Amino acid sequence: MSFLFQWFFDNYIEIVGFSSGVVGVWLSTRQNIWCWPIGLVNVSLYMYIFFGSKLYADFGLQLFYFVMTLYGWYQWKFGGKEHLGRKVTKASTRFWIGYLLAGVFSNILIGWLLFTYTDASFPYWDSFVSVWGIIGTFMQARKQIENWLVWIVIDLNCVAIYYYKELYITLVLYFVFTILAIIGYYNWKKELIKNQITN
């Protein structure tokens, strides 16, 4: 019992981050707007965790997530043409071209900066997660269904990174995120089909 108590005490920030992350993503798969305020708790805790682990791109990503969480909260509540909240849509070809160009260029640039000027672990790999995390969050805020496909790729990459960094609780979190992203895709696909029928 004392061992478990000590383990919890040593890892409580990561445990609370884990819990808030799972709840937030689960709510997102159900298009529940409470995913955004819970997301604020999650990103705040992971800013602390990633900075301490010298995953600086991930730390910077959490700062961006904080801002994007506020943006997503607003978009889900007041976004869209009639400001009544967004509905699930597919990303247009124009959006995808922009995402790919921004993703590749930013990944190379940020990876090089991290490699050259910091002691970051896995600078290009870390950069990939961060850049596409930004794109995925923007897509999620706008309720573009493909955000879940982006998250599946990101989350699987994170599982590998956090295994190497021995962040085992966070590793399990991102494995759970992968499962939730698959569920989210199929849940949102049902909503997309329903929206297309009613329109």
Image (cartoon, helix red, strand yellow):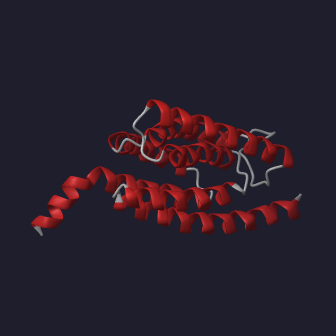
Asked whether, in this view, residue 94 is left or right of residue 24, the answer is right
Task: Tell which of 63 and 199 is nearer to you.
Answer: 63
Quarter of the image for the C terminus: give it. bottom right
Q: Residue furthest top?
A: 117
Residue 150 locus on image (x, y percent): 65, 56
Q: In screen coordinates, is 113 left or right of 6?
A: right
Indicate the position of residue 194 as horizontal and vertical percent values: 80, 65
Query: Is residue 147 or residue 168 the one in the foreground?
Result: 168
Q: Residue at x 84, y 49 (%)?
A: 92
Name the outermost residue toward the left: 2
Q: Name above or below for residue 168 compared with residue 106.
A: below
Examine the image and state in which quarter residue 100 appears. Answer: top right
**Residue 5 at x, y percent in the picture:** 16, 62
Count all numbered tags in the image, as a single digit: 0
Query: Which residue is painted at 26% across and 55% down in the image?
Result: 11
Image quadrant in which the N terminus is located: bottom left
Is residue 4 visible in the rendered structure shown here? yes
Could you say which is closer to the camera, residue 172 or residue 74? 172
Residue 138 lies, in percent from the top left, at 66, 43
> Would residue 34 be seen by someone viewing this image from the given angle?
no
Tell whether 110 sits left or right of 194. Answer: left
Q: Residue at x 78, y 61 (%)?
A: 192
- In the displayed structure, 99 sits above or below 195; it is above
